[in-house]
Amino acid sequence: MTTPAAVIHVVDDDEAVRDSLRFLLDAAGLAVRTHASAEALLSAEPTVPGCVLTDVRMPGMDGLELLRRLRAAAITVPVLVMTGHADVPMALRALKAGALDFLEKPFSDDALVAAVRAALDESRRAAGARAQTEKASARIAGLTPREREVFDLLVEGLPTKAIAKALGASPRTVEVHRARVMEKLGARSLPELVRLALVARAEPRAGG
């Protein structure tokens, strides 16, 4: 299964800026899509791996509101915001709302490309972590209800006798369920079960 190409979504109401950024990122060997407004980007539904490079001040929906809308829609691509000196406070609010970074104009070509590559690296890392979480959750979901109860108590650190008492079962029955849990989840030890539980419960970072 091939990994989809990472796409940089450039959002700016100034056509000349969009064209300039497309040319620069194309020259760096990166895939680019441009959007004339925040609304246009939301309609495109950007997916991972990828990132969003957006101006912070635009007519209609600004970059800060765009970030909020992306997060509300559970679209977790990293977001970089571009800002003029007067808009730095707005950019700082964007960081607090989950933006990965901001670039103050005028910025160099090298600084922009470096920031975009860092955002793509973060996107790939987050996508990998998300895949691990989904895989671990799917494996745990394959347990029977009783096996899940035993699993939950095992990862809380309860010994067999305590689990048996909590479930109203014999220690021998708990041991049987424990063996089945270990086999189904491919775990060889209790620490492996705990790590699997932690991965399954992991939440993606806001910027990822």
Image: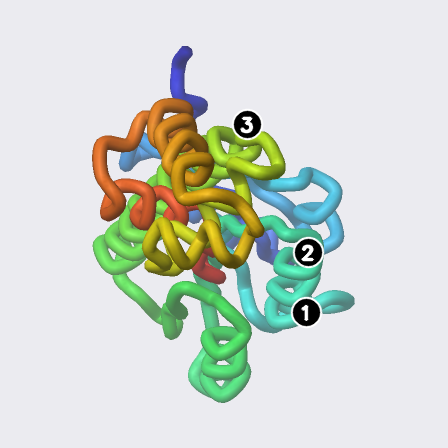
Q: Residue at x 43, y 47 (%)?
A: 21
Real-space Cα separation, disc 1 to disc 2, in angstroms: 9 Å
Q: Quadrant of residue 62?
A: bottom right
- Choose mark 3 or mark 2, whichever is in front: 3
Is 38 drawn above or below residue 6 in the view shown? below
Q: Which residue is mark 3?
A: 142
Q: Which mark is residue 38?
A: 2
Q: Which of disc 1 and disc 3 is earlier in sequence?
A: 1
Front-lying residue, 108 or 145: 145
Q: Which of disc 2 and disc 3 is earlier in sequence?
A: 2
Q: Which of disc 2 and disc 1 is earlier in sequence?
A: 2
Q: Residue at x 30, y 45 (%)?
A: 121
Task: Say what amino acid the circle numbered 1 marks.
Answer: Glu
Front-lying residue, 181 or 132: 181
Front-lying residue, 92 or 128: 128
Secondary structure at badge 3 equals loop
Real-space Cα separation, disc 3 to disc 1, in angstroms: 40 Å
- On screen, residue 60 versus residue 80, left or right, reads right
Q: Are marks 1 and 2 in contact (CB under 8 Å)?
A: yes
- Choose mark 3 or mark 1, whichever is in front: 3
Q: Are marks 3 and 2 in contact (CB under 8 Å)?
A: no
- Count neighbours of disc 3 (C-alpha within 10 A) and say few if under 14, some if 14 to 19, many if 20 or more: few
Is 175 drawn above or below residue 15 in the view shown? above
- Choose mark 1 or mark 2, whichever is in front: 1
Task: Say what amino acid the circle numbered 3 marks.
Answer: Gly
- On screen, residue 200 versus residue 37, left or right, reads left
Query: At which x and y percent is residue 89?
Result: 49, 88
Q: Which mark is residue 65?
A: 1
